[in-house]
Amino acid sequence: MIPHDGLTDEEVRDILLKSKRIVVIGMSRNPSKPAHYVPMFLKNVGYEIVPVNPMAEEIGGLKVYKRVVDVEGDIDVVDVFRPSEETPKVVEEALKKRPKVIWLQEGIYHPDAVSKAREAGVKIVWNRCMMKEYKRLLG
């Protein structure tokens, strides 16, 4: 059982409204996978999407980075589409870029990842889909 992230609707709405640039770790080339269509939805509603996937050069017309640390510039949200067991390492790497928020997609949670983010003073969302939350709170 995944515990609730403790964030209120107002806090999640605030993240969605204030965020502009979203780095997507694990973005997929496969259009039928949530790791593809969720970030493409977010792009279509106005967010800047920066894919991270070591196995791709380009996804949906967007330049892909091999690692999050290779991404230049400020990052509002690091959106994670990786298995829960990989998230502590993913979060540790992402924290080097000092994002405002780390967002673990639906079904993704790891207590060590949460601890790492919180210790670094970074807000963390887990077990929520950015697209569903956008539609629910802003749609």
Image (tube, rainbow, N blue to C red):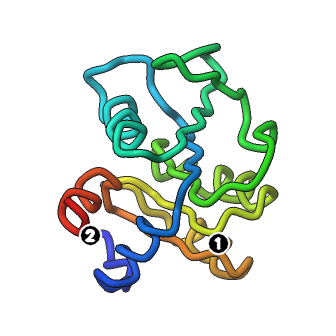
**Identity of the residue drawn at 44% across and 18% down:** 29
Q: Specify whether 110 is left or right of 40.
A: right
Give the residue number, with chain letter if any, for mark 2: 1
| For marks 1 and 2 on the same chain, the one whose residue lies earlier in the sequence | 2
Q: Which mark is residue 117?
A: 1
Q: Are marks 1 and 2 in contact (CB under 8 Å)?
A: no
Crowding near the residue tagged with mark 2, few <14, some 14–19, many ≥20 C-alpha atoms within 10 Å: few
Crowding near the residue tagged with mark 1, few <14, some 14–19, many ≥20 C-alpha atoms within 10 Å: many
Q: What percent of the width, then of the height, locates residue 130?
A: 35, 55
Q: How many marks?
A: 2
CA gap between label 1 and label 2 equals 21 Å
Relative to 89, say whether 44 is above or below.
above
Q: What percent of the width, then of the height, locates residue 11?
A: 40, 82
Relative to 22, say whether 31 is above or below.
above
Label 1 element class: helix
Label 2 element class: loop
1 or 2: mark nearer the eye: 1
Q: Specify whether 108 is left or right of 18.
A: left
**Identity of the residue drawn at 52% across and 62% down:** 19
Q: What percent of the width, then of the height, locates residue 103?
A: 48, 60
Q: Quadrant of the N terminus?
A: bottom left
Tag 2: amino acid: Met
Q: Specify whether 68 is left or right of 26.
A: right
**Identity of the residue drawn at 52% across and 35% down:** 26
Q: What percent of the width, then of the height, locates residue 127?
A: 34, 62
